[in-house]
Structures are given as structure tokens and as C-alpha cells.
Amino acid sequence: MSGHEEARAVLADGRFSSDKRKDGFPLFTLDAATLQQLRSQPPLMLGMDGAEHSAARRPVIGEFTVKRLAALRPRIQDIVDHFIDDMLATDRRPVDLVQALSLPVPSLVICELLGVPYTDHDFFQSRTTMMVSRTSMDDRRRAFAELRAYIDDLITRKESEPGDDLFSRQIARQRQEGTLDHAGLVSLAFLLLTAGHETTANMISLGVVGLLSHPEQLTVVKADPGRTPMAVEELLRYFTIADGVTSRLATEDVEIGGVSIKAGEGVIVSMLSANWDPAAFKDPADLDVERGARHHLAFGFGPHQCLGQNLARMELQIVFDTLFRRIPSLRLAVPMEEVPFKADAVIYGVHELPVTW
């Protein structure tokens, strides 16, 4: 499905399953061993349906409200300022923005939110990168297993030594209710650590590329930082980086957009195509930071809409506002066509982003 209206219809329809363990579910680049590993693990929230999904999602929603995340804003600002301080202090240019800012900011933010010791961030950053890169299938399986084992140990430690973080609060709540579910918490942690890091990191890099390569749009944002939230929405629409988790399996016969889909057939929803649908967005190939594109599907739609979207928006707004305010002369250090991009089934992003000022 590539149309905006049709994509929303599929993603909101309970007759389409997200459970990747079901026979016939459309999966890509998975060999038999990887598929067996996937089916042997408790499902992530992304792979749950109906009441099971609602029950898993409901207790965590409160952790990602605008009000709760507002308390994290000063810490995010400090983190961003710290890494920009380091950029300004170096006498070596150009600077690789991916290594200097895009990767470490979301890494440290997610560590703060979830109670992950920052001393461990290099480990899970490298493993999540390996899982979404064009590495061998053996490397991806090893990264998956190592990250899962680390998270299992992290939850075990928090069960005995709770702190003031998302997982400690979930453990306390489940104990009070008599529903402590270690395996479920491991699955939740795995989802939040991986989904909350790599996608935001790539969006920072791509957003900077988008604005630097469209200087007239950057001028609008610099002239009025109040426009940054609207610019973030347009950049999310324009790039739609997380476009590989939108497979579904029809559990009943369904008709969407005049197309008959039989029970047991797989459906692929292209968020990027939906976000570039001219029926929903005028001149979709144009980057227009004043578009007001809040109805984009970069965070999905329906019951599986991204849990951490408020956090991602806040991080992006703080990064773009701070970066272009503190380094107003920032520019690409190589021609746009020489910026090394990566593209695979899960993430579209930037390998390196040489910038100077």
C-alpha cells in the first residue's frame, strides 16, 4: 500500500496482524535460523495484536506524555550543549556530525530515560547499529543475542536494585499488582532501547542535511525558532526513515482502496510513499518547513503509532534550534552528492556527515 489514505486504513484495521511469528507474515532477509530465533522469543510490543498489545502498551504510555517528558527537557538541553561545546572546542575540521552529535545525543538521552548506565552505551550503540546495517546475517544474529542478554541482565539488576527510571517504576508497579513479568520487561526494554536510539540519530543527521541543502528553508527556521516544531514535522515527513516495520498479515478477507486482500496474504505499507502522496501533500517532493505536515505517517498510525514520538520530536527540536543558533555558519564540508548515505530494509540514514563552519 503506497497511498496515504490506504496506508492509514491498513494500519488502523484490527483485521491486519502485526505478529511476525504467524505463518505467512511478510518478512525480509530472514533465513530459517533467524526466523526460528524470532519465534522462540517473547514478542516485542510491535509484534502484538489486540488486547495483548493494549495491555502491554497501556502501562508505559504515561512515561512518554508531553508533561512527563518536559521534566527531561533541561537535561536534554545540557546533553546537546555538551556535545556542541566539544565541536566548537576542536581545532580539527571538518567534524563528522554523526559521531560528534547525531549518535551520542539520543544514546545518552535514552540512557537517562531508561536507567541504562552510560558506561554501557557504547555496547548497545554498536549492537543496534549492527542489527540495522548491511552486515552478515550471522553478525545480526550475534548482535541480537548479545543485546538481548545484556538487557536481561539489566532488568535483573533493577529487580534487586531499583532506581528512579522507567524500568524500575514498571517493576515496582508489577510487583504491587502481583504481575511481575521479567521476560515481558526484557522485550519492552529491547524495543525501547533499539527504537529510541538509531532512528533519532539518523533523523538528526538527515534533518541537518535537509536544512543545509535547502538554505532558503533554513533561513525561515533561523529567523523564527518558533517555526522549528513545524520544520521537524516536515523533515519527518520528507525522510520517513523508519519504513521497514510496516508489514501486516490479513487475518480476514478485507477490501482496502478497492483492492481485495485475502486472509493469509501479507501487506506491505510504504510510509515513505504515503508521506509523498500528492493527494495528501501538495508538491510532496519539495521540502517546505511551513507546510504543517502533522498528518504524516513517519510515526505510523493506529494502535502501533510510535510510543516515543513526543521524545523524538523534543530531541529534534532542541538539537536543530541549538545547533544552528550556536553554529550559525555551519555548512557541509563536501558537496551534497558526496555525503555517504546508507539504505537498507529498516533504516535510511547517513554514514558520515562532514560539516565545518
Image (tube, rainbow, N blue to C red):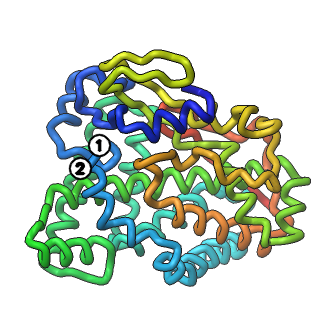
Tell me the crowding category of disc 2: few under 14, some 14 to 19, or many 20 or more residues within 10 angstroms, Cα based: few
At x 39%, y 72%, the residue is: 63
Residue ID for mark 2: 52
Type of amino acid under label 1:
Asp
> Which residue is most to the left?
178
Q: Is residue 25 above or below residue 102?
A: above
- Does residue 257 show up? yes
At x 25%, y 57%, the residue is: 55
At x 77%, y 75%, the residue is: 326
**For the residues bearing labels 1 and 2, Cβ distance under 8 angstroms:** yes
Most foreground residue, 273 or 50: 50
Q: Give the mark count.
A: 2
Q: Is residue 242 above or below residue 262?
A: below
Determine whether the residue tagged by mark 2 lies in a helix, strand or loop: helix
Q: Quadrant of the N terminus?
A: top right
Q: Is residue 279 above or below residue 265?
A: below
At x 66%, y 72%, the residue is: 84
Whole-percent x, y for residue 103 in the image: 53, 58
Determine whether the residue tagged by mark 1 lies in a helix, strand or loop: loop
Disc number for residue 49: 1
Whole-percent x, y for residue 114 in the image: 35, 70
Q: Quadrant of residue 98?
A: bottom right
